[in-house]
Structures are given as structure tokens and as C-alpha cells.
Image: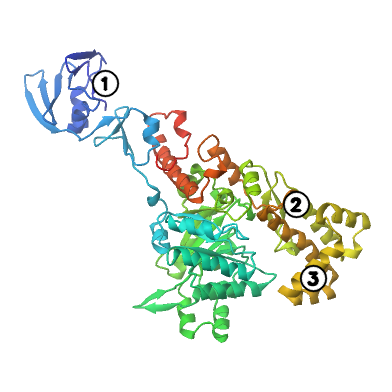
Amino acid sequence: MNLMMSARSVRIYRGTTSEERTPGGSGLARALDQGGAAALAALLDDGADGVELEDGDVTVRVDRSNGAARVSTRWASGEALEQHIPLARGAHPVADLVAALHDPTRTLRFHDGKWWEGEGPAELVVPAIRPESLGAPSFRDAHGVRVNYVAGAMAGGIASPALVIAMSNAGYLGYYGAGGLPIEAVREGVRAIKAAVGDRPAGFNLLHNPAEPAVEEATVDLFLEHGCTEVDASAYMGLTSAVVRYRLHGIHEVDGRIVTPNRVSAKVSRPEVAEPFLRPAPVKMLQELVAAGKLTARQAELARRVPVAEDITAEADSGGHTDRRPLPVLIPLFRRLAARVAAEEGYAVRPRIGAAGGIGDPSSVAAALTLGADYVMTGSINQAALEAGTSDTVREMLAQAGYADVTMGPAPDMFEMGVQVQVLARGTMYAQRAARLYELYRAYGSIDEIPVPDRERIEKQIFQRPLADVWAETEAFWAARDPRELERARADRRHQMALCFRWYLGLASRWARVGDPARKRDYQIWCGPAMGLFNDWVRGTWLEPLAARSVVGMADAMMEGACVALRLQIASAGPASLPESAFRILPRQPGS
């Protein structure tokens, strides 16, 4: 109960001046009993030297005295009592509430209709929140990182060695975008990262490759050769021997504890795909690995007690491969699935659930964590970072994107299956042109069956060269990479058509990365709506210029802002409305 409102009259002393108020209340004695000593001391919180309260039945005088509150109470019956109550150190009212809420190092409390700093009574406390405290502590322990924020693996080397190294140096985890690169290019990237970071955290992408399983196996061999212990498994529709072999390589037991040197984080968007990663590897697959000499019988036995993946990243509406599922559905769904599987399998620790897709500003980070995410992963926004392995032209295009400037187009690696990827729509015709190629692939059995007018349009508008030249380049590529594809194309003319069309789809992403000005309208730029959200957030701030967008600066600003967003959630639960300006969370500039 508010003591002042319970009094008939109030006199407040400050130095040589005094202020009188007449709340006209009653029941001061009852309010004193309910509030206790802390409520009496709080009367001096606003800087007053003394306060006198009276309601006819009782008079209370509170004065500052040598760091304490001297309380004199007189009842109408003639009884009197004097007390000395220690004052809270440093307690003072908040002068600028928005600035205080936006400083995540400050603890605030709401009491008696006001916001305060320092110790004292409170109806609501807004604690200090730092990025290092957000998400699951087990994620930081397992990966050796400072903050539960991950830069995801953007294929084709867009998540470059420079990006991974910068993240590692700052105490974050980044995954190298090895997917889609030639194996020798992957080797060079791995060597550069390992040379720069040593044993510090660094991750590497293992992209599912159903068309070329040998590439997936070779990538695992390379990772094992170079001691890469963190892998992001992406675009998987089910477990493969390659990802299971990587996970279980070197598994052993120490003092009854199973040790798995290699960690797998699986990026998925469906429970039926997530569950096999949450469970131990299938017995049949383990038996095949033992028969092939890739595991010992004892290792296969230990493998039946650990999940294939320690981390499952729920991929919502992301760039590239995506099912465009809503994050508020995926996170709680995956959390319950992980808890159920952990209980059934008897795991000591539940596999962690992360959030990806649509993470483009601090509020989306805070929302993901509030939903129960153990960590967050960004992707699209990092393509505009200085360290991203793409062209300045692409960065400029991304910096102009709005949240709706994205669309779906055929995926180069799964073209024949009809799988699509989310790409930037603004400034490029890739999605429409690739979709036209897929329509022709579905409609005809070979290139020769395509009507002449359609063939001519393809050559002029999409390929910008004769189909014969495209096939010659395609033939030379597969002769060096995998001659079996050419044998299949000779026997299956429809497969030959698919390989020709994939020539365009594959080069479209390369033209974007190198910034080929002649093919700008064909750029395939993987992008989700988070890019537009980020651009809207940083508009008019120090992070708007491309020159300011370092991947670490972006990560720091996102996580600092998430702390503020979470504090605002707490403060909003209080009895007093917050000013609208409090909800405009600006990116904090380094050093400020």
C-alpha cells in the first residue's frame, strides 16, 4: 500500500524548504504494518531530507541521519516509538527511463509509482542482462564460445574463411560455407581457417548431395583429415552414411563417459527429419560402417547411446533451401520432440534446439529465445557483411532489399526433384528464368523435343549462347568431375537436358559471387525476409552503410539489442506504461 496516499497530510522537507500535500487518505497505521521498515526508508528515495505523514490517528516523521532513516512515530493515544533503519546505498530515481532500459548493464526497479536504481523495495525488477547469459549455458560449454549466436553456413563460400575467422576471434561460432564448392577449394578454405584459429571454435558445412554422394563422402574425409570437429549438416532429408561416419569417428569411452570428438548441428525444418538426428544412428547403418572398417564393434555399441546431432537448428523462413515454416511453430514443436526423445533414449542432456530463418533484428532474436531457443543462427544478413565471400554488387543489392523482396526458384543441386530455394527477387530474373527451365524439363523428354521458338528464347534470353555450346561446356565439366553422368546422359536424353539446364542454375550463383556485370539479371542470391528486417532496423544508424557491416559488429549489435528487447518485455509487465520511444532499439555502436 502507498504510505503517502494513506495519509491525510504530507510534508516533505528538502534543505530549508518544505512542500505540503493533502492526499486526504486514512489507514496510515495499517499501511505501516503492511509496508514495514523498507517502505518507511523508501520515503526518502526521491532525495528528500525528511518526510512527515499524518492521518489523525498516527503521525510519522522520517529523517536522514548518518546514512540511516530515523523514524519517529506518535499515536493519538500518546505512545511514541523511535527507530533507525539503514538506507539502501546508491538508491536514486531514474532520470531518463528510455536510456536506462536501453543500457543492459543497469538493474532497475519499479516501486511506489516510480523507476529506481539501487537497492530497495520493488514491485517489479528489470535485471541487468548481458549477451553472455542468453540461451543455454551448455551450448557455450560444448562449443567453447562466449555467446550463443552463430553465423550459418552460406554455401559456395559466401560464409568465407574470413567470416569464420572473425567470428572465432570474437568468441562466436561461424560455419564455413563449403557446400557447392569444388573439393580442392574446400581444402584451401579449411587450411586457411585452421591456420588462423587453431583449436578455437570454427565450424564447417556438410551439405547433403543426393545427386553426388561421393562428394559428400569426400568432404567428410577432408574434415576428418584436418581435424574439423564442428559440422553444420544442412539440406538433409534423411541420415546418410557420410554424416553418421563423421559424427562417430573417434568415439570412445573414458571412465564410463562416452566421448564424441566430432559434433553435428543439423539444420532442419520438419520433425520427421529432425527425429533421426535426435536419436542414435540406426543399427543397420552402424553394422554397415563396421563391415566397411569405418567403426569398430565397440564403437558401434557406444554409438547406440548418443544422438547423431547434439544441436538441431529449426530452420524457418530462411534464404536458400527452406520450407518457409513459421518459427513460433517450429521451436516449441522441436523442443517437445527433443525432450521426448531424450527421455526415451536416456540421454543425460537434452539435445539443444536453435532458431534460424527470419532472424534479422534484436526483437526477432529475443522472440526466438523467449520461444525456448537455446541459440540463434543468422544467414541472409551476413551476406551483406564485409567478410562475406560475395561481390560488392550483391552486397549493394541486398542492402536495398525489403522483407517482401524474395521469392522461390529451382534449386541447382536438386533441380530434377523440383526442390526450390528462396532467393532475392529485387533486381534479378533468376527465379522466373529458372522456373521456365523447370517447366520445359517437366514437359519434354529431350532438348530436341522443345519447340523451336522456346529453344530460341532460351538461347537468347537465358543462356545467351547456343545450346550446342552449353552442352559442350557441360560435357567438359562432367568429363572431369564424374564421367558416369555423361554415360547416363547418352542413354537418357532427358538427363542430358537436365544437365544443360543445371549449367545455368549453377553458374547463376557464381555470377553473383564474382559480380559479373553482364549477367546481373541472372544473379541467384539466396536470401530470406530477415534481410529486409535488418535493413529496416539499421536505417539511419551507423550500421546502415555497407562499409560498417562487419559480421562481428552486426552480431554484437544484434545480441546487445536482444538484451534490451528482453528487458522491455519485463518492464512492460509492470503497472506503468512505457514510452513508445523505448521500443525503438537502436544498434549500439562499438565503444559507446
Q: Which mark is on residue 475?
A: 3
Crowd around label 2: few <14 · some 14–19 · many ≥20 (10 Å): some
Q: Measuring 85% from the left and 70% from the top, which residue is drawn there? A: 493
Please say whether residue 168 is visible from this viewpoint: yes
Residue located beneath label 2 in the image: 519
Of residue 488 and residue 268, the one placed in the foreground of this image is 488
Res. 20 image quadrant: top left
Residue 3, position as x, y percentages in the image: 23, 24
Quick check: 402 above or below 321? above
Q: Quadrant of the N terminus?
A: top left
Cα–Cα gap, marks 1 and 2: 74 Å
Where disc 3 sits, the SS reads helix
Of residue 532 and residue 258, the one placed in the foreground of this image is 532
Lateral position of residue 36 relative to residue 421, left or right: left
Res. 188 image quadrant: bottom right
Instruction: Give the residue type that dot 2 points to.
Output: Arg
Count of numbered tags: 3
Q: Quadrant of the C terminus?
A: top left
Q: Which mark is on residue 5?
A: 1
Instruction: Give the residue type that dot 1 points to.
Output: Met
Of residue 582 and residue 577, the one placed in the foreground of this image is 582
Where disc 1 sits, the SS reads helix
CB atoms of marks 1 and 2 within 8 Å: no
Q: Measuring 51% from the left and 45% from the top, which residue is drawn there? A: 364
N-term-proximal mark, 1 vs 3: 1
Lateral position of residue 499 relative to residue 245, left or right: right
Q: Is label 1 or label 3 in front?
A: 3
